[in-house]
Amino acid sequence: MYVTIPGERHAARPPLLQTKATAKTQYHHIATGTHLFREGEEARAVYEVVTGVLRLTRVTEDGRRQVIAFGYPGDIVGFPSDGEYHTDGDALCPTTLITYMRSALEIGAGNAELHRRLLQAALREISAMQDHFMMLGCKSASEKLASFLCTLSDRFGCPLGQFIQFTLPMSRSDIADFLGLTTETISRSFTQLRKSGVIALDNIHTVIVLKPDVLLALAEGED
Amino acid sequence: MYVTIPGERHAARPPLLQTKATAKTQYHHIATGTHLFREGEEARAVYEVVTGVLRLTRVTEDGRRQVIAFGYPGDIVGFPSDGEYHTDGDALCPTTLITYMRSALEIGAGNAELHRRLLQAALREISAMQDHFMMLGCKSASEKLASFLCTLSDRFGCPLGQFIQFTLPMSRSDIADFLGLTTETISRSFTQLRKSGVIALDNIHTVIVLKPDVLLALAEGED
DNA sequence: CGCGTCTTTGAGAAACATCAACAGCGGTGG
DNA sequence: CCACCGCTGTTGATGTTTCTCAAAGACGCG
């Protein structure tokens, strides 16, 4: 089942969407593997990830899966369309969330400031999804993995001596389904990056970036 | 350069974002090939497409292009992030737009109703982009093209006898860059659909769907 | 009519998927 | 404590899809 990752609980950060009007912040804890919402379900809330990581997925009728996004601290997840969730959302490790009732999306008058921040979050989400398009549509397998690791390194890497370290709470097949590849190809690309000395794997879920500049170059497509 | 498509000017429809507060609707006409905005530019407005079609693209440093979306009537385009456009936007045929100043995105108090509709439009956009992810990540070449044609057929197809007809204002290479394929593969997939009697091409830019049910089945992955 | 651009078609090459076997690792139970 | 089991990940051999390169055809435009 789900492996509990010795996990990089990212430093607390001020909630993005929080406004003065809702002074008392209600945190919500969920365990690894918990489903926060499912595709097609009526959307009752949007969530801000505070610590931990969520996985957002969609599945076709014939069982092919696409990981739409990973929800890291600072991300807003669960944006509905026509009142429904359009992805499954579940926790890859113990996760803390802030819940914002769906009404915040709809009643403009109620809390204009929260509403404004939600729109900004939605716009950032659109921008992030466009980056993801570039990966899925334009890049080779090794470029995709390099881009993916680069993004995580930039957003969540911790200095380790002169290197950068971060954890991958998701499985190889999650990464594969995120990048539109197979687990075998992901595994081979990891091996390639290891053998060329760009990264090291402390354990399966811990990446150490040895040559950040080379990783970035690979991500941009300079073989 | 750009070929002017004998174009399917879709029936006028009530503006999505229009509110009573801005009673007099200001329409804006642009010619084929006109750039409405460019990536990295300061975002001064968002646009609602009324007639015509826009193409939203992004390009990597080394020149690979991804068509992020096509903006058809009823779509809102030009959502900024951090105050900037993140795609190029240009017209594939003569296009009519309604302009909404960027301030509408930011000053919640100014026009709460417009703000609310913009958020709804952004949420629809996110949902549409998730559908696009499924195409890019999960589907084969022929499935991608079938899905693409299906979507256009559903949204903009006109009955032609017992068949459905619609126009493709974009080039084969636009379709290729939208689906993460090459023009040659698109061309071959079109030929395949033609030879199997699922569609007919009246001319390069006019598709007639002969077997909608088969096209849908192909789109869903039932070979 | 001729030219340039876009599209189609073909042949060969490359990337990635698929299938299969094996290794590593944690958990369980004897 | 060790043997066994199941799961995930890795590696290898092979197959398929799609890309690349090349050439010819179609179409609009001057």
Image (cartoon, coloured by chain):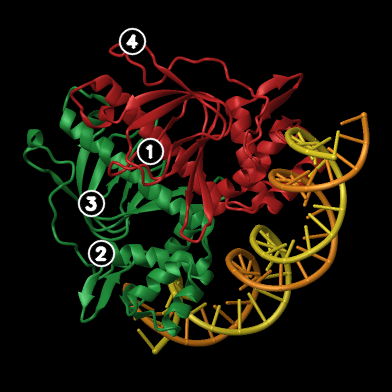
Chain colours: A red, B green, C yellow, D orange
Image quarter hosting the N terminus of chain B: bottom left
Spatial distance from mark 3 to mark 2, Cα to Cα? 11 Å
On screen, residue B161 versus residue A43, left or right, reads left
Spatial distance from mark 4 to mark 1, Cα to Cα? 34 Å
CB within 8 Å, label 3 to label 4: no
CB within 8 Å, label 1 to label 2: no
Q: Secondary structure at mark 4?
A: loop
Q: Secondary structure at mark 2?
A: helix
Which residue was labeled with disc 4? A23
On screen, residue A186 versus residue A108, left or right, reads right
Dot placed on the residue nearer the N-terminal end, 3 or 2: 3
Q: Secondary structure at mark 1?
A: loop
Which residue was labeled with disc 2? B156
Spatial distance from mark 3 to mark 1, Cα to Cα? 20 Å
Question: Residue B162, percent across and down?
Answer: 23, 81
Q: Amino acid at mark 2?
A: Phe
CB within 8 Å, label 4 to label 1: no
- Chain letter for the residue marked with disc 2 in the picture: B
Q: Residues within 10 Å of mark 2 (few under 14, many from 20)?
A: some
Residue depicted at x 55% and y 30%: A53
Q: Nearer the viewer, mark 3 or mark 1?
A: 3
Same-chain check, marks 3 and 4 = no
Q: Is residue C28 above or below residue D23?
A: above
Viewer-nearest residue: D9 or A32 = A32
Q: How many numbered marks are there?
A: 4
Q: Amino acid at mark 4?
A: Ala
- Chain letter for the residue marked with disc 1 in the picture: B
Which residue was labeled with disc 3? B74
Residue depicted at x 67% and y 40%: A217
User: Can you tell which mark lies on residue B85?
Assistant: 1
